[in-house]
Image: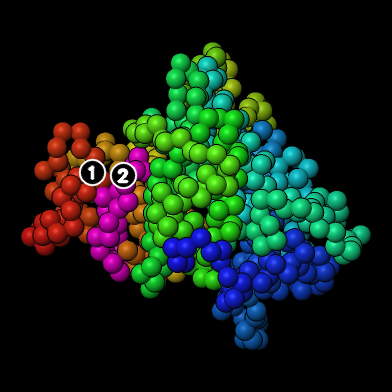
Amino acid sequence: MSDTDQKISTDSLSKMEGIKAASNQLRGTIGEELQNSDDSFSGDAAQLLKFHGTYQQDNRDLRNRKDDEGNRLGKAYSCMIRTGPPGGKLTADQFLTELDLADQYGEGTLRLTSRQALQLHSILKTDLQKTIHEITRIKLNSYAACGDVNRNVMCNPAPYRNNPVLEQMQETTDALAAHLKPRSTAYFDFWVTDPDGEKQQVAEFKPVEEPIYGESYLPRKFKIGVALPEDNHIDVLTQDLGFVAIVENDAVIGYDVYVGGGMGRTPAKKETYPALGKPMAFVVPGEACAVAEAVVKVQRDFGNREDRKVARMKYLVDNWGIEKFRDKVAEYYGKPLAPVNGALITGVDDYMGWREQGDGKLFLGINIENGRIKDEGSLRIKTGLREVLNKYKMPVRLTALQSMILCDINPADKDEISRILTQNGIKLAEDYTLTRRFAIACPALPMCGLAVTESERVMPSLLDEIEAELARQGLEGERISVHMTGCPNGCARPYTPDIGLVGRAVNKYTLFLGGNVLGTRLAFLYKDMVKFEDIVPTLAPIFAYYKEARNDDETFGDFCDRKGLDDLENRSAAAA
């Protein structure tokens, strides 16, 4: 987009813009297609379903399947449903119901995402209404969990009960999520009022006002996070809109607001890139929603609606510059914006293990590798969690590292809960290396249509190899973050950790180094098209160099950033 104050032209809009504008506020033909006998939705309907929190997918492991006579069968379609509770807060019954839905209608697993959400996979079209209806019955919803709107608002999930700051942050998170929900009643019409679809009728369309999103919603997806300077658990700078709490005398006096973060890139399009948010303004808590609305409206009116690959708000911020973007937000907000406080991000926690909660009770952080809750062999995560949650009914919080926290635990119950978990093969925090605790991976194959190679299914074996190499070199106690994705879109935030691995082709990855666990620096591209089996051999000489030449308390990412690409390549070549 050019650096002008002209709104995007209606000429040459992307196809998706036409679909949204003609959708009757996110309805399209979804109502009619829910009634037919097809096993999949049409292309336009599938695009609109994203706004309702569901992606149509097909199992790519089954694309070449044949019947008994050798005839090729069609794709095995199903839907993923994402539930996005603000800040990842759930009751025990809500979590247990999601587990039940995974068994009843899905593939038997529940996935915790890197945005503190839940995903059900392999829901057949015939079961979609019943499943989403049940999610709404337990006072959750999938509305706007996907699509060109604001998605799940992230927040520090630490359940410290003696910390009013965390409570204030969650209040802001809840307010932002509610304020930025679409107003369209389509979600209610399709999924809430008629779970069996027997009476579903396509009534005469009666539009409601969409004061924030307008008739075409946003040019692209939009993400928000709320964090603390001393604990950037949710990677606030990777968000389109980030709020960093400024605290005085145990109270949030306001937020430093960052704009223009985003992870996705397309290697073939050099104009695409990952970005970290830029400091825009300081706002008091009561104005967070109004400023967020102004930011969203600026992106709505000036974001690129012609090319979806450069439609995220980061491109608008970069093309305009932060000063012009700030001025435009202030114009929409209606008054000048105060300069940022400038608090530095200094820490990050994963909340794993047993912790004092602050009110005489405990909480327990449970590492869920890649966020996949399942029973497989001796590891019975689903069974163990069912038993604990059914017995103790404690609240649950989801983390940004695809793991979970059990809250409000009486100290007298600690030993029994530990026994139930270990009996089901669920390890406690001390049984994991820090590297594994801070590792995340996207689902990738077989269900994601964008994946070019594996991620979740190969991450455990990759971590086995990395841990073995670190132990061999005496580095097993280091906290080295590893994020892996099956494509460049960056759902597991692979462009900010110490080590980022991004799917490039079948069994090949782009290796990034030099980010950090704090999420305050982008990594640099170290090597492209690295075969999976070559990842650890490629890292090994860099680990050795780190052990030999690091400064005191220097992290692996800081070391790689200080040495730079040329130095690391030279050392690696000398070690070959």
In the foreground, 516 or 482: 516
Give, as a three-letter code, the residue at label 1.
Asp
Q: Which mark is residue 540?
A: none
Name the side, left or right, on which 221 lies relative to 390: left
Neighbour class for label 1 at 10 Å: few (<14), some, many (≥20)?
many
Q: CA distance from mark 2 to mark 1?
A: 7 Å
Quadrant where the C terminus is found in the figure: bottom left
Dot 2 or dot 1, earlier in sequence:
2
- Quarter residue 472 falls in: top left
18 up-or-down from 323: above or below: below
Q: In the image, residue 349 lies at what x, y percent?
A: 40, 33
Q: For the image shown, how many numbered marks are present on the structure?
A: 2
Q: Which residues are magenta?
A: 511-535
Q: Are marks 2 and 1 in contact (CB under 8 Å)?
A: yes
> Which residue is under mark 1?
558
- Quarter residue 413 falls in: top right
Residue at 41% across / 68% down in the picture? 266
Q: Which mark is residue 516?
A: 2
Residue at 68% across / 70% down in the picture? 19
Residue at 70% across / 67% down in the picture? 21
In the foreground, 364 or 202: 202
